[in-house]
Amino acid sequence: MPPTVSVNFYAPEVIADPWPHFAQIREAGPVVYNEALSVWHVHRHADVTRCLTDTGHLSSTVMKESAPWIADSMIANDPPDHHRLRNPLQSAFTKRGLARWEPRVTALIDDLFARFAAKVAGGGRVDLVDDFIWHIPSVVIAEMMGVPPEKRAAFHAWSEDIVTGVGGGTTDVSDLGRQKLARAQEASRLIREFLAEEIARRRSRPADDLLGQAVAANDGGAMTDDELIQTAVLLLIAGNDTTAKLLAQCAVKLFQFPGQRDLLVEDPGLIPAAIEEVLRLEQLSLSVPRSVVNGPITIAGQVIPDGASVWLMTGTANRDPDVFPDADVLDVRRSRSAAHFGFGHGAHLCLGANLARMEVRIGLERILSRYPRYDVRGFEFSESWSVRGPVRIDFAPEPTA
Ligand code: HEM
């Protein structure tokens, strides 16, 4: 019998504070069966690294069921299909490929920040997420994809619904899970309809935006139309909620660790390292799902049967004490922060990681240089397991005396 626990990771109170449950899993053993969700948890840093590299035994196709709206995109497919779906976009997201976007991204963020600062100066209640952070990634990706401004708010709302719906009706069979699934299905229908039109427009009139590039790169027909639409859906949704919540987490964590914030104010060159460290400490996607194929597979001496669902507990692995001493502490000077799983690892390593890093860096630079002693009077977390993070931050430019 494997070590067994019974934890519903979709319960709002568990999402709000998962750490005691992670500790319980860690104590139970390196590989643990969770009878509440019928999944296996693997959580040690070394084991998660191995599993994320072994695409031959741990398949991403499990995502097809929990996120059907991106079933035919790279994230839900294994090599060699995965390469076929990812390669046409790879170069646009390298540091070099993104360099041409940086001035535009900076201008967009500066514009949003100017509006935020005006609201702060006006006094009254200010929400750092709703009044600033929330808009950044959706405006940036919409600009890069060539989405017209009037559709941008809708995109963010669709994206939130789709991401929150992951696992609804499948792993999470509660009423809440089913409601989330229904909202996600409707959002995905609307987003697909819109993208089909945009892709058709690019075909008749080539454009130098990401969607145009994807259409052009696919000229040889490597992807079917449906795969192309799902890839665009993936790009539109994968970076919105995640990037916003990472910046929001940075703002909250640096407030909670004011000594670390002072270090960044003194030396903004430390900001990129701080972003990695926040992502290590507060992994947004607390687990990465896989299923065992061509199995069974043995991990840390435990046999996991063929067909089993495995959750690679990246949030727990990011606090593995064997790799990160004082793992629960934010330390922007930590030497191995970058070994975290915040952006995944291996073949499916986040395609948009460099874009996210750029947006969060610019956003954080603006906040810290204008409000080096900002106050957080309260914050609220989303109920999403797959992208966890603050959705409201009551912000004040300075602590009250
Ligand atoms: C994959 C996290 C931002 C696009 C992933 C994965 C993680 C992740 C953990 C791996 C999933 C797996 O192995 O199954 C994040 C976080 C972000 C972020 C924390 C922000 C802080 C973005 C952005 C984009 C993006 C801005 C694009 C605009 C993708 C894509 C994949 C992916 C396309 C699939 C890659 C593949 O399957 O080969 N992301 N992401 N992400 N991400 Fe991100």
Image: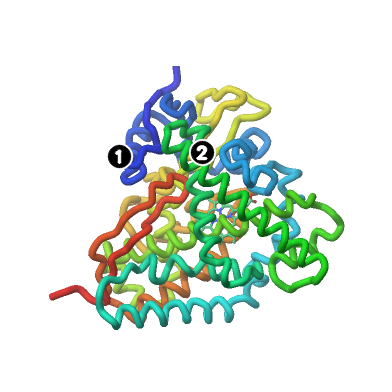
Is 177 placed above or below 209 here? above
**Left or right of 371 in this view: 108:** right
x%, y% of residue 211? 71, 65
Mark positioned earlier in the residue sequence (2 or 1): 1
Is 112 placed above or below 168 here? below
Q: Nearer the viewer, mark 2 or mark 1?
A: 2
Label 1 residue SS? helix
Quadrant assignment for the C terminus: bottom left
Using a 10 Å C-alpha cutoff, classify the residue at mark 2 as few (fewer than 14 neighbours), some (14 to 19) or many (20 or more): many
Using a 10 Å C-alpha cutoff, classify the residue at mark 1 as few (fewer than 14 neighbours), some (14 to 19) or many (20 or more): few
Residue sitting at x 51%, y 65%: 153
Quarter assignment of residue 208: bottom right
x%, y% of residue 209? 70, 71
Q: Which residue is mark 1?
A: 20
156 or 280: nearer the viewer: 156
Q: Which mark is residue 167?
A: 2
Residue sitting at x 77%, y 62%: 200
